[in-house]
Amino acid sequence: TQLLEQSPQFLSIQEGENLTVYCNSSSVFSSLQWYRQEPGEGPVLLVTVVTGGEVKKLKRLTFQFGDARKDSSLHITAAQPGDTGLYLCAGYSDRGSTLGRLYFGRGTQLTVWP
Amino acid sequence: EAQVTQNPRYLITVTGKKLTVTCSQNMNHEYMSWYRQDPGLGLRQIYYSMNVEVTDKGDVPEGYKVSRKEKRNFPLILESPSPNQTSLYFCASSSRYQQGREKLFFGSGTQLSVL
């Protein structure tokens, strides 16, 4: 059972286009994180959102945490080839038995063509 | 430089031959974890450790063992590897859980092939 569902699984777009990646769950998380992974490397943290409704911006990337702390989105404006990579969302459980465990979505493979 | 170091980077072995993948972190982190990454399945947690001598199963622990005798090291042991354990493995570490603000640091990965 996948706790976090990411969509789409694959995204192939032209340079300059906008895109949104979604991360959804029926569970509540104490926080949501987004990681980016490049071929041959481990994932690297981009952002952590903690408060329901929180919006964070990282240059052309905008991250939002849902009001109920069950979902998140990543929006990229004017995508560039350097944005190409695997984007992973991850949520910290706030349940008693799994408190502190970090669960990952399956990832969105983004390819931006020049 | 803060880092998580895994070795080896690539490993080809045969079914049944015991192997160990080492993981070491230099950030004095309490939490360490092993993941495997397979196409279409994402990152799945194998084992994790909240501190020295404290380990627990993740989502896919079958066929793996771990130990945490020192804070900095968290080796992954495959006692009798099988072809379905062919995968890309990542070790990760972070500071102690504090409301989900911790950053998980990943190693560069170990690509394991079991023939």
Image (cartoon, coloured by chain):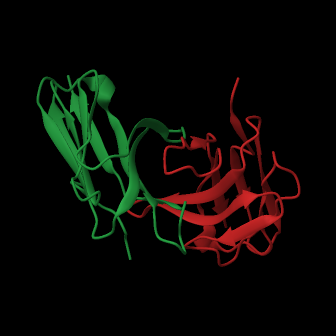
Chain colours: A green, B red
Q: Quadrant of residue B34?
A: bottom right
Residue A70's x, y, as percent?
28, 61
Q: Is residue A80 visible?
A: yes
Q: Is residue A105 visible?
A: no
Q: Residue at x 81, y 45 (%)?
A: B72
Q: Quadrant of residue A14?
A: top left
User: Is residue B96 placed above or below A98 in the rendered structure?
Assistant: above
User: Is residue A73 placed above or below B51 in the rendered structure?
Assistant: above
Residue placed most toward the observer, B39 or A20: A20
Asked whether, in this view, residue A7 is left or right of residue A41, the answer is left
Asked whether, in this view, residue A38 is left or right of residue B115, the answer is left
Quadrant containing the N terminus of chain B is top right
Residue A110's x, y, as percent?
27, 40
Residue placed most toward the observer, B12 or A80: A80
Which residue extends farthest left? A17
Circle count: 0
Which residue extends farthest right? B69
Residue A50's x, y, as percent?
37, 46
Q: Quadrant of residue B80?
A: bottom right
Q: Residue at x 20, y 27 (%)?
A: A79
Residue placed most toward the observer, B102 or A52: A52
Asked whether, in this view, residue B32 is left or right of residue B102, the answer is right
Q: Residue at x 28, y 21 (%)?
A: A59
Residue B97's x, y, as percent?
59, 52
Quadrant containing the C terminus of chain B is bottom right
